[in-house]
Image: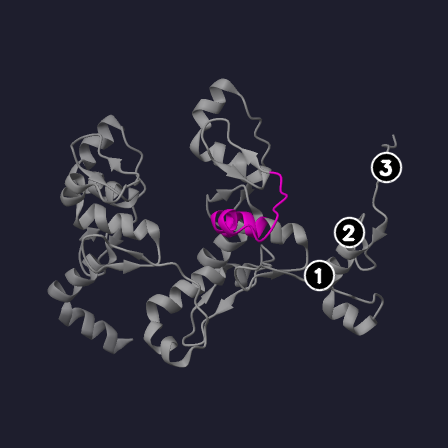
Amino acid sequence: MKTEQKPTKNKFFCMYCDFGTRKNQRLQNHIYRKHKEQNDLERKVSIKLRTFSCVYCDFTTLENRYLQKHMFIRHKEQNKLENKVVIKIKTHACVYCDFTTVENQDLQIHILSKHKEQNDLENKVPIQLKTYYCVYCDFSTVRNQDLQTHIFIKHKEQNKLEKKVALKIKTNSCVYCDYTAVRSCRLQMHVYTKHKEQNDLENKVELQIKTYSCAYCDYLTARKQDLQMHIFRKHKEQNDLENKVEINIKTFSCVYCDFTSVEKRFLNNHIYKKHKEQNELENKAEIKVRIYSCLYCEYTTTGSQTLQRHTYRKHRKQQEEHERIE
């Protein structure tokens, strides 16, 4: 039985793949992005590119819609004041809070992560997200790019051998060491934290990083979350009194005692160390803990550095002998 194909409104089609579009400029942009090397050799299509530049930073793009998205996400408040660019963009608003985004997929992801239980009851927003699963572990995500990034970071060597997933990832390399990052912002953060003095002298990388300063000491960071974590750990009592900084940190609480942590892994380690037998009986908390075992005795721990200290203190001679044999 033949299935009827929906009529297409596309007028322009790629000569190298099945891509189609209603605009000639978009076709040229597609060929430039996806088939540049092939087209440079065969010269089937004459490429005339138009670029759109941001008036507030050095961001450039081949399509005005991407510039509009960039302006909305990066410079919304600044543009409201200066009004340099008229932003005409469709936004998607959350029905449960004041979150807005330019991508419907991002709105669905937000509702799934922040309001899942409420939305399951009220069913105000239909969630239509494809899930991508890792072939090497139980990681899953609704973004294919995030899956690719995960495999690149967590299973790069294994995937090189087994070649289960074809990775299409552009990496950004550090000019001062062999560090690589998938996201340019991560590379900038790396240069800022590891090579700031060298980069200030040589100026090889133009850093566009907003820094956050502590209101109670001289601590400085490029991550807002790190500043909040620092104040929570170092100045909690002082901040509770003076209330200079609004702290929005998710904490994880123990179901057996009053222990709290800002990281799930520390809570898992705590339950494993302090309430292991009780939790095996009552099964109140599902914990995932990595166990490090000593090569020379039955000692186990949840920390790699703790294992190193144990090995150095208890088995230094055995370790030296083992290294000499190898």
Q: Residue 81, percent across and down?
A: 49, 49
| SS label for mark 1 | helix
Q: Quadrant of residue 3?
A: top right
Give amino acid for label 3.
Answer: Pro
Q: Residue furthest left?
A: 313
Q: CA distance from mark 2 to mark 3?
A: 15 Å
Q: Quadrant of residue 48?
A: bottom right
Residue 122 placement, left or right of 28: left
Q: Residue at x 55, y 26 (%)?
A: 125
> Measured along the vertical axis of the image, is residue 149 above or below residue 324?
above
Q: Residue 285, percent across and down?
A: 28, 32
Residue nearest the viewer, comparing 292 with 39: 39
| SS label for mark 3 | loop
**Which label sits on residue 7?**
3
Q: Residue at x 48, y 24 (%)?
A: 119
The residue that disc 2 covers is 19
Residue nearest the viewer, comparing 197 with 309: 197
Residue nearest the viewer, comparing 68 with 258: 68
Mark sitting earlier along the chain (2/3):
3
Give amino acid for label 2.
Answer: Phe
Label 1 neighbour load within 10 Å: few <14, some 14-19, many 20+ = few
